[in-house]
Image (cartoon, helix red, strand yellow):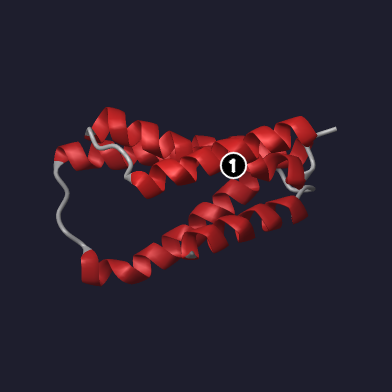
Amino acid sequence: MVAAAALGGYQLLTAELRSDPATTSVFYSGLVTLVFISALMPWIWKPLTAHAVLVYLGMGVAGWMSLLCLDKALHTLEPGRVVVYRYAHLIASVVIGLVVGGRGPGLAGIIGSIFVVAGMGVAAVAAP
């Protein structure tokens, strides 16, 4: 619920900051994330292996690229048209889990994915 609320807040804030460059809002979102995560670090920090560093760097680059694309889309289109497709990350996480982790979704994940895909289809058909 916290992640969904944060994502919704991010999308609303990005839509309000249309006059700023997309890179500015991506920078601010990274800064806010850094502040919140840094506050938790003293209690959860563990030394990283070289493999973990590469994985985290890859996640950071992928996250930065996805937020940059989202911001560019929100600057170009109406937020209602863009937000629906943002839920595609749920489908992508299922695919990545299968490919990288060898773990598939449970029944609830499959049902949720079906609803997400159906919702995206309805939004695509209903769009002007």
Q: Which structural element holds mark 1?
A: helix
Residue at 27 percent across and 38 percent down: it is 55
Three-letter amino acid code of the residue under disc 1: Arg
Q: Is residue 67 visible?
A: no
**Count of numbered badges drawn on the protein:** 1
Q: Is residue 118 left or right of residue 43?
A: right
Q: Is residue 81 left or right of residue 54?
A: right
Quadrant of the rendered structure where residue 57 is? top left
Q: Residue 99, relative to residue 19: is it above or below?
A: above
Nearest the eye: 120 or 54:
120
Nearest the eye: 35 or 66:
66
In percent of width and height, residue 86 lies at: 59, 42
In percent of width and height, residue 97 lies at: 31, 36
Residue at 40 percent across and 39 percent down: it is 93
Q: Residues within 10 Å of mark 1 (few under 14, many from 20)?
A: some
Q: Is residue 95 visible?
A: yes
Q: Which residue is mark 1?
A: 86
In percent of width and height, residue 63 lies at: 46, 41
Q: Residue furthest top?
A: 99
Quadrant of the rendered structure where residue 128 is? top right
Residue at 60 percent across and 35 percent down: it is 69
In percent of width and height, residue 85 lies at: 62, 38
Nearest the eye: 66 or 97:
97
Nearest the eye: 104 or 6:
104
Q: Is residue 47 left or right of residue 63?
A: left
Residue at 48 percent across and 59 percent down: it is 3
Q: Residue furthest right?
A: 128
